[in-house]
Image: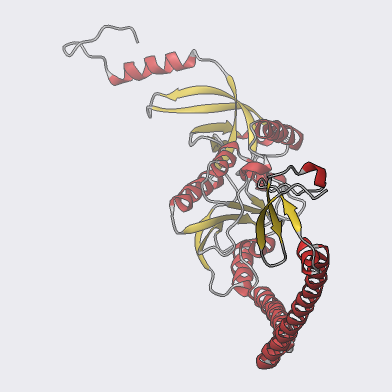
Amino acid sequence: MTAKTSPEKPLPIRSVLQMVSQWIGKLGTVWAEGQITDLSSRGGTVFLTLRDPIANVSARVTCPRGVYEATVPRPVDGARVVVLVKPDFWVNRGSFAFTALEIRPVGIGELLARLERLRQILVSEGLANTERKRRLPFLPGTIGLICGRDSAAERDVLENARRRWPAVRFKVEAVAVQGPYAVGEVTEALHKLDADREVDVIVITRGGGSLEDLLPFSDESLVRAVAACRTPVVSAIGHEQDNPLLDLVADVRASTPTDAAKKIVPDVGEQLALVGALRDRGRRVVAGRLDRETAWVTAVRSRPSLADPVREIERRAEQAGGLRDRARRCLTSSLDRAEDSLGHLRARLVALSPAATLERGYAIVQFPSGEVVRLASSVGEGDELSVRFSDDRVHVTAAKPPA
């Protein structure tokens, strides 16, 4: 590969291929894991394709029949294996392939251990948390269904869903649900339905099977694709005892395809019965309210003020008249008593008044200052005095009394 070449001094293609073969031959052997597809045999050689279960990558492998038959159990299409391979370059055809030196099937225990490790990773990332799971719409307009071609699971979902709600609509994506192409086809169908704005919920379903048959639904790439969907996803894989990792991240897990049909659409009979029960309950509530209000109105109307308003006004008028007469009597009585008391007071005043004494023939002698003369010795000769009678007064001058 380090030979100097130029347009004037090119190498023959055989020499180039021989150098490629020598360089590839130096790579040695390596253990590789994958899934067997396109298994066939011709003469003493077995041909197969070793496919990566996650990425869309594969490689051709040739295996001597003795190596293939020495593997227990013998590998079949879809089997997961670990192969000791040596890269080879065929100079005559200019093609590259691996030669299998030893094949070891991946046991159930190893598969379960790998699935458990992946489960723990998904849980630690929060993909199994109930908080991130979305509720299914009550009545989806269109349901996306990913299932096997002409499978019993497809019939179970379609028939049971339409039996529950005849107007339900489906968009069915028929894919491989086991084998080496299952993961890629299911993932592609999932992306297609998730991008469709008419699809309100996606159902991924298949019937029961062995652990190896259900392995595609525990594939990490598919599981993460489901977790990233914007559309709610229902997982209905196998039977009740089957538990692929898809169930862990799906928004809703259905134990069977029939159970999925029950979860995605309501039962029209049950809903009609529920509507009828709610309608009857509403009628009872409204009727009860009307009865209570009618009884209240009847009670209000039976009150005297509303039953005979004129009679109530007359009764109030009689009360007002009675109160007026009573006030009048009370005021008259109070005035009479006050008048009597005033008469008695006036009589007493008259009896005690000096005018009454004067009317009986008495007189009052006063100095000009108004002071009453009480003693004759207080009057001097020639003093001006006023003598007051009951009806008049006279002015006199005091004279010396005769001897």
- Looking at the image, which is closer to me, 47 or 261? 261
Tally the numbered discs: 0
Q: Which residue is nearer to you in this view: 237 or 46?
A: 237
Q: What x and y, as percent, mark residue 166?
A: 57, 75
Q: Quadrant of residue 307?
A: bottom right
The residue depicted at 74 percent of the width and 32 percent of the height is 113
Q: Is residue 117 above or below residue 164?
A: above
Snapshot quadrant of residue 314: bottom right
Q: Residue furthest left?
A: 8
Which quadrant would the N terminus be assigned to in this image? top left
> Is residue 387 found left or right of 28 in the rendered image?
right
Q: What x and y, as percent, mark residue 79?
A: 64, 40
Q: Where's residue 358, x and y in %?
A: 77, 65
Please name whichever residue, 156 or 64, is drawn nearer the observer in this view of the structure.
156
> Looking at the image, which residue sits at the far front?
403
Q: What colouring does the structure picture have?
A: secondary structure
> Can residue 39 be seen in the rendering of this structure?
no
Whether 333 is drawn above or below 213: the answer is below
Residue 142, given in percent of the width and then of the height, sits at 50, 63
Q: Nearer the viewer, residue 213 or 160?
A: 160
- Can residue 232 be seen here? The reply is yes
- Say above or below: 311 vs 159: below
